[in-house]
Image: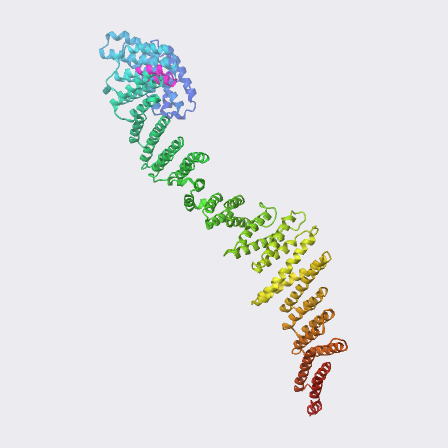
Amino acid sequence: MPIPTGNKDVSQSANKTDKRIEAALDFVRDLYKLLSSDPSDAPATDQLVDQINQHVKKLHNYTHKHVAGVSGDPEMNQQGTRLWNICTRLRRDCEPTNKRLKRLYLHGRVLAFHLLVVANPSKTRKAHDLIHVVKLALKAARDCVESSEFELATGVLQKAADYKSRLQDLASGLPKEEVDECNCLEVEYLIMRTALSWADNHVDVAEHMYTKAERLRQYLTPDYAEKLADVLYEIGKSLASRNDFSLAEKWLQRANEVINTPNLEHLSREGLDLRLAILQALVSALLATGTSADLDKATKLVEFIESEMGHRPVVSLLKLEVLRKTPAEIFDDDAYADVLRRLIKDFNSSDAGFKLIIHHIRKLHDKSPGAACAVLDDFTLSLHGVDDNSWMEKAVITRMWMITSQRDTNETIDTVRGVLSNLTRPLSAEAAVAAQALIWKKLESSYSQRQYDIAENWCRLSLHHIFQNCGPGNIAKLQRKLLLCALARNELEAAISVVHNLSKQSWGEPMTAYLAFKVAIRCEDRNLAEQCIHIIGQAPDHVDFLGACIAESQKKGDIFCAIAALKKLQENYEYKDPNPINLPALFRCLIRLLNILAEKPDERQGEFISDLCRQFDIVVYALERQSNDAQTPKLFTVDELEWFSRNAYNLALKHTTTWDLRCVVRLLTACVNIISHFPSDMRSQVEVTLKALFSRFIIASALISFARTQDNVKEQLEDYQLMRKHVLAFDSLVPEYLSRLDEQSREDMVRKHATLLTFDFEAAVALGQWDDLGGIVQRAVPCRSAVAYQTMADSLLRAQVPGQVLYSTMRKLVNEIWDLESFDAVKLAKYTRCLFQATLPLDDTLAMKLLQEACGKARELHESDARWPEEELEWMAATAFNHAIDLYGAYERDRAKEWGSTAINLAHYCPDRSFERMLQDKFMRLSFEDDERNRGR
């Protein structure tokens, strides 16, 4: 913080009358106290510096005077020395980044110097005091120049000039040692003037000052020689930074001459380092001029340094600079590489050393890529055992950059792979990805140029084990590219090898699975192909990939793989809109392909036929799933419905005799189910309905065949039940469309209808659905088919039917047969006898009704030209009489009497009257009265 100026104790000298000097002393005391405590607590350093400068200016105006009681005062000298020392110490210990405090300490030293100048005026006769002040001035000036405080430095050097002149006046009376020291101070003064002039851009003044200092070189001690050389070196460096290399070379050459003035053993360690720095800068300046003469000078200078220092790294670096500057036509890449290998051998395991070597390897790569790659390979291998793996990673990435920057050859790639094979530690994820990114560009370029062998080699390089941390995604991408290369070269064995070595992550990606599918289909490995299709089907974006698999299968003519891919698409979607695929088209493709397989005789033909049928079943399922809302777009158009129904129908008819009949039934069932979804206002409604009728006729015929030959009762009944549904559907459609048919078609349809009703009757009997039998007989009336009734009657008579059902149904059948013109007495007698025979064991009451009806029919026939067949009459009469005898034996005399008399009545119509008389004789022998008496007892 700024120091307040107030009344303080002044010097003990009574004659300190100048108030400005007294104020300066007071300020110095307070400043010393502040610096002694904690100067960092002074936030307003800029204001403090301004106060210091004010006192510096005031003291500067009085230092040319010898003030009595002030000049030579011990306390003033003490205060100035104390301030000088504390500022020097604090500035030395201060952090380089704390520029505000360093500036404060510098200005404090300048204030201390001016205070000492007041205390030791130049008019004094004491030479050692003058020398002491000049030394302080030069030190302060040097610090001012280094800190770019040129105004301060000028003021200090002005005071130094006064004291230097006074010393020259006293030189004649001084001892030789002090004279030599004065000469050295003169040289250093000139050095500082040279530096200050250069800093102020006064080149001519700097040149003049150096010329004056040159004349006093013989007085330079090693210490002063180092100081002068340092100033000249800084001037040379500054010129070089401005690209004025010719002038820089001049000043650096002067620095070199000055630093070499004393013997080397007299130079300090800093002096020796300065000498080497000057030589390095001089070599760089010579090389930068670009002239062959300067190149030769630089070469000789480097050889000189090498002769002195041997193969030190700094010498190697200079040699590299010289070699790099040689013209391209004579550039010695082997020599450059040898120097680099020497640097690698001397590598000190530091970041700076690593960056330096990599930098020069890159420089060599600009001129000789092959040599640079060889050197980098050696360097990479040398880093194998180093703890810091980042250096090896950077070296590998640089190597990848180099190989991708030159012409592609398998030999260069194999060389790199050989080097990497000697490395055991994998690269970090970041380094591995960086290296692979470089390789990927070359890989893509080679692949796009159809250089598949080189692209494959790039892939294998990227998949080297040291890049294993690149991440599963990158590995999968590279493995896919490797597959593409193998496919492009048509090397199926190599492709199969890649597929078998795919990572788990890679297998999980649909693109990888698709490429593996291409390999599998070319190798005819259907198991692998199906595995690939399964993997693709699990991916979210599988539609396009499965479509590509289908196209690839068709291209190779592999129907099996195409079907597998189509089925996978089918599995993944519900049968409704909206849908990313056209399901009807998908179904059509599957049906066409399966039909090709089903047409070929093969051990798996049955499987293909069943699968084909299943596809039609799926079509039906999809139709049932679609919305019935009129506003919702339909999944199937009318044309598509027509296509599916037609193909199902045609396939069934074509293979009725060659395929399993149940498959035919499945196809026709699908056909009628599809037809049921046709719109009601179709123009071809009649044609479609006829197709449905024919289909149901064939289905029913097949099902009755299954049922008749089925050993499994449950399955038999299921076939009967299903058949009845189809007959019922047929029955409901026929009446409406008979009138629209021509006569021939109508007759055929009626015959089919009658046949189906007989099937329905048989099924109802087998299912025990007795209540339906009468209705079936009634539905058959429009058909007017005696054959149908006869068949129904046969079915009824063969089965174990309840008596009442048998009687009532048979009566209907017989009545319907009787009403038909084609029904004669023989058939009537036959059916009556059969019905009687079946009814008698079950219910003789019903049998009695039949017997009585037979009597009536026989009487009617007897009165007409027709006759009841004699054998039928005799059989029924004999059977009835025998039943009467059985009843008689069971003591049912009344019923026996009824049965006996009715049997005799029926025998009456037999042409052979002897049969009737025989029955009458036997009947008369029966004693119905005795039986009554016995029963009464």
Comparing 346 with 808, the one in front is 808
Tell me if 13 is positioned left or right of 488 in this view: left
Residue 647, horizontal then vertical, whole percent: 61, 52
Tell me if 673 is positioned left or right of 96 in this view: right
Q: Which residues are magenta?
A: 231-253
Considering every residue shown, the one lying at the far right of the view is 863
| Position of 889 relative to 389 (above/below) | below
Among the 4 quarters of the image, the one containing residue 901: bottom right
Comparing 524 with 253, the one in front is 524
Name the residue at 69% across, 54% down.
Answer: 686
Tell me if residue 823 is in the magenta stretch.
Answer: no
Tell me if 810 is positioned left or right of 197 in this view: right
Residue 753, horizontal then vertical, whole percent: 68, 62
Asked whether residue 17 appears in the rendered view, the answer is: no
Which secondary structure class fits the magenta region best?
Answer: helix
Tell me if residue 241 is in the magenta stretch.
Answer: yes
